[in-house]
Amino acid sequence: MRGHYFAVTAAAWDHVEIVDTTNLSWFQSSDTSRRGFCRSCGSRLFFDHGKQVPLGVSAGSLDDGSNLAIAVHIYADERGAYYEISDDEKQLSKIEWRNEGWGSIPWHG
């Protein structure tokens, strides 16, 4: 399986306020995860893996992402052959991410 990059940032649940849920829908994608998306246009907005880990937030959904920086590329071993990741950017394979998860990167929740 090959994937395409998707920019996601994260926030501790107690730092998140969703002010309008009119078009927000949730899909239970596994026993432990659900995905939030826009009911109107289908855009991916959130990745919820439970309150004990940060809420994944689609970086493209933010009004101003100018203060975001790349912390890690996950599933790097499954990236498409048509793009490169700089050697100075942290990369984790699918297995490494599953084993190390959030503990593998600096997290300030």
Image: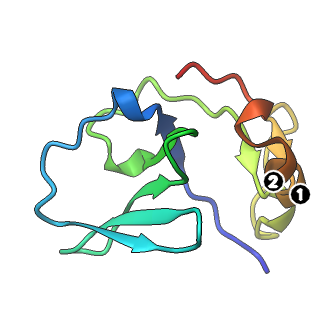
Image quarter where the N terminus lies is bottom right
**Image location of residue 99, percent across then percent down:** 86, 48
Residue type (three-letter) at the residue carrying disc 1 = Ile
**Residue 80 picture quarter:** bottom right
Q: Note whether 65 is above or below 58 in the view shown.
A: above
Secondary element type, mark 2: helix
Say few, some or many: other residues with alpha carbon within 10 Å of mark 1 (under 14 / 14 to 19 / 20 or more): few
Residue 88 in the figure: left or right of residue 14: right
Q: Note whether 93 is above or below 87 in the view shown.
A: below
**Image location of residue 60, percent across then percent down:** 39, 50
**Image location of residue 43, percent across then percent down:** 34, 68
Q: Residue at x 46, y 31 (%)?
A: 12
Residue 53 in the figure: left or right of residue 57: right
Q: Farthest residue in the bottom direction?
A: 1
Q: Residue at x 57, y 19 (%)?
A: 108
How much space separates mark 1 and mark 2, taking CA atoms? 5 Å
What numbered label is drawn on residue 95? 1
- Pointer 1 with pointer 2, Cβ within 8 A: yes
State the colouring used for the structure image. rainbow
Q: Which residue is mark 2?
A: 98
Q: Residue at x 46, y 73 (%)?
A: 28
Foreground of the two, 42 or 82: 42
**Image location of residue 86, percent across then percent down:** 81, 40
Question: Number of callouts in the render?
Answer: 2
Foreground of the two, 20 or 85: 20
**Residue 36 picture quarter:** bottom left
**Residue 59 picture quarter:** top left
Residue type (three-letter) at the residue carrying disc 2 = Arg
Q: Note whether 21 is above or below 106 in the view shown.
A: below
Secondary element type, mark 1: helix
